[in-house]
Amino acid sequence: VTSTAGAARGRAPGGPILERVIHPLDTILLVAALVCAVWSLVLLMLSRPVGKRWLLGALLLIEMGLLGQAVVGVVELATAHRHVSAVTFVGYLVGSLLILPLAGWWSLTERSRWGVGVLLVGCLVIPVMIVRMNQVWSGG
Amino acid sequence: VAESPLAEPSPGESSLRAATRGGPGRVLIAVYAVFALAATARSGVQIATKFGDAPLAYVLSAVAAVVYIVATVSFARGSATSRRVAVVSCTVELLGVLAVGTASLLDKAAFPDSTVWSLYGDGYGFVPVILPILGLLWIRRTARAAATTATATSV
């Protein structure tokens, strides 16, 4: 998947340079979100959540990465001279920024272990959105 | 000070709200919110940019979006009335998933582009067909729990 996306991007003027910038970030964010998902799942299975603050801190870092991804993505879209479903692509970029703050807010007022369950849902949505925005970028 | 049932929720009402929104209900509402966001964004883009391609599918996407929004809000409110709305929207959702899922299997031509509910929500890990069932079960379970606390406090 990555190679075909890379080949498609390679044709765009300025594409190859930006590709190297955004791709590691995409992968890092995807893996980080999955790690946090596993972390939430472990906390959920414990009878009482411990260290939820550390998890929220990690999610804050991911959120900052997503913000960077959104900025890079919009710049990349503006400079790419090829057909990308722009509305959908920007929709995913902006939409991905909403997930973790909302999940964090909704989990804060829940004292029971189900609060981290909300964070688990948020963490699982992020990789899906990253994969989808890459599919949209490569014309899927 | 006169007692105003509208301004101050009764003990039964507030425990009902806490029961609906708390525990696993938190996660249920979170998943509903994700689907409300996803379906709204998807149908918004579909209708705004390419409505002519698959009008039926896109209208159904919009219907699904409305159902998810109503369900999210009514679970999150957790009042006696909103819980009844939640039951209705979960039922509509379940019937919708089953009807659209079956129709998309039988008549592929009518669904050139997929909706949230196509093929019983296979594009979303079949969560769309499981979610309304969980929603209805949750309403049933919390109603029983709230009934016990309500009788306990009123006696």
Image (cartoon, coloured by chain):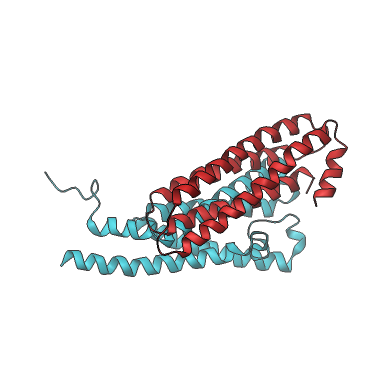
Chain colours: A red, B cyan
Residue B41, can we see it? yes
Residue at 72% across, 43% down: A24
Within the image, what quadrant is residue B75 found in?
bottom left
Residue at 67% across, 40% down: B48
Residue at 44% across, 45% down: A105
Residue at 62% across, 65% down: B126
Q: Residue B129, image x and y in percent?
A: 58, 66
Q: Nearer the viewer, residue B103 or B143?
A: B143
A11 up-or-down from A30: above or below: above
Q: How many marks?
A: 0
B27 lies left or right of B58: left
Residue B67, can we see it? no
Within the image, what quadrant is residue B144 found in?
bottom left
Within the image, what quadrant is residue B127 found in?
bottom right
A120 lies left or right of B115: left
Q: Nearer the viewer, residue B126 or A125?
A: A125
Q: Residue A28, image x and y in percent?
A: 67, 46
Q: Nearer the viewer, residue B77 or B21?
A: B21
Q: Residue A85, image x and y in percent?
A: 75, 40
A28 up-or-down from A41: above or below: above
In the image, farthest residue toward the left: B1
Q: Residue B19, image x and y in percent?
A: 34, 60
